[in-house]
Amino acid sequence: MNNFTFYSPTYFAFGRQTENEAGQYIRRFGGTKVLIHYGGGSVKRSGLLDRVIASLKTEKIPYVELGGVMPNPRSGLVYEGIELCKKEDVDFILAVGGGSSIDSAKAIAAGVKYSGDFWDFFDGKAEIQQALPIGTILTIAAAGSEGSGDTVITKEEGMYKRGAGSDALRPVFSILNPELTFTLPPFQTACGIADIMAHVFERYFTNTKDVEITDRLCEAVLSTMVRESPKVIKNPSDYEARANIMWAGMVAHNNLCGVGREQDWSSHVIEHELSALYDVAHGAGLAVIFPAWMKYVMKHDINRFAQIAVRVWGCTMDFANPEATAMEGIHRLETFWSSLGLPLNFAELGAKEEDIPFMVRNIGLKEGETLGSFVPLSNEDIEKIYRLAL
Ligand code: NZQ
Ligand code: ZN
């Protein structure tokens, strides 16, 4: 196991009606003037925003609102949010929604405390040192942003989708009420499921040896997802299944499952080009890319692929031909994602073969650079993975 640090300072409030305590938590964590940041309208339609505002009013906490965060959140609204926070002397940001609203809130929180252009954090020109405190009320189990120090923003000019990270971005509190996810359309639910599983895969496929504890944690999260996911597709109001998935989404990405081991993350970078170019859901793009990546790199460590096939997918180990077991695991993943209504190739996603060279270029690897760590990928490898996903 490698040396590591693990910092997960978020206070989690989980369960029914916990959103009504938002005002109390903001007060406890020092907020005196709040920006409520949300998406395209689901929080209004569900009545959630009204309940959150009522909770702030009970605590007599003044607030301003900024809605309109789009899935694959854009830099334009981040600039607007930074200006608004400065103008209104906001000292706390409350994101109400999914990964997109939370990520946009994080970018605003960092931008307010920075004298330069916030995009510097996303193209590697500056490191995030400080940010306004953030609270979240999660409405979709997916990105794990409620417990992570990461944010992913798309810059409109050039449609660059880039990430930035810092422990300063970890929310001070996150409210997780599984009931808030009942209104998710099945496709959106499925995209969230793919993202949660992908966050585990990015950590599971590692070259670090003897990481039994994190291997087993990863397998537990994946097995839970395999068991619970069909239930919420069948019955969107299944509280217990929604609850298990919601917590799995947090555990999958606050790095509990990834400490002490090399992590890969190339599939996320390869996917981000798809969601930037076609504005598709991140989870849908991952469902297309991950099986292709797995087939491409499988031979690097057949035993690891066979291990996941046996432990998560219940395949029988073929000791004479472990490669067959490994491949069976990948096929079971494809069948599983397909059964949830997810796309598995470019055609089903609406992506185009002729855009592949552009996407490879846009990833921006410089001469001699590679992507990922399990198998470091060159531009040629990345192109082959896109083509395997056609
Ligand atoms: O905008 P509204 O109207 O709220 O609708 C949203 C949106 O259309 C809708 N939705 C959310 N909760 C709902 C609901 N509709 C009905 N009922 C509800 N309860 O769902 C759509 C998707 O929302 P979004 O916030 O985009 O979803 P998600 O949580 O999957 O976030 C995706 C973003 O997170 C980034 C992705 O790249 C993508 O931009 N990621 C962030 C990470 C992080 N910060 O750690 C890690 C991830 O790997 C990921 O890259
Ligand atoms: Zn993701």
Image: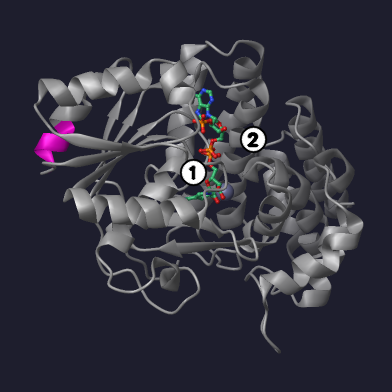
Residue 370 is situated, as x and y percent measured from the top left of the image, at 68, 79
Q: Residue at x 60, y 42 (%)?
A: 195
Q: Quadrant of residue 194?
A: top right
Which disc is residue 191 wearing?
Answer: 2
Q: Quadrant of residue 67?
A: top left
Does label 2 point to a residue whose CB lies under 8 Å from ligand 1?
A: yes
Which of the two labelled residues, at mark 2 and mark 1, occupies the earlier sequence position? 1
Residue 372 is situated, as x and y percent measured from the top left of the image, at 63, 69
Q: Identify the magenta region.
A: 25-29
Residue 211 vs residue 295: left or right?
left
Residue highlighted by disc 1: 100
Q: Residue at x 10, y 37 (%)?
A: 28
Which disc is residue 260 wearing?
Answer: none
Q: Is residue 26 magenta?
A: yes
Amino acid at the residue labelled 1: Ser
- Quarter holding the N terminus is bottom left
Between 185 and 308, the residue placed more toward the observer is: 185
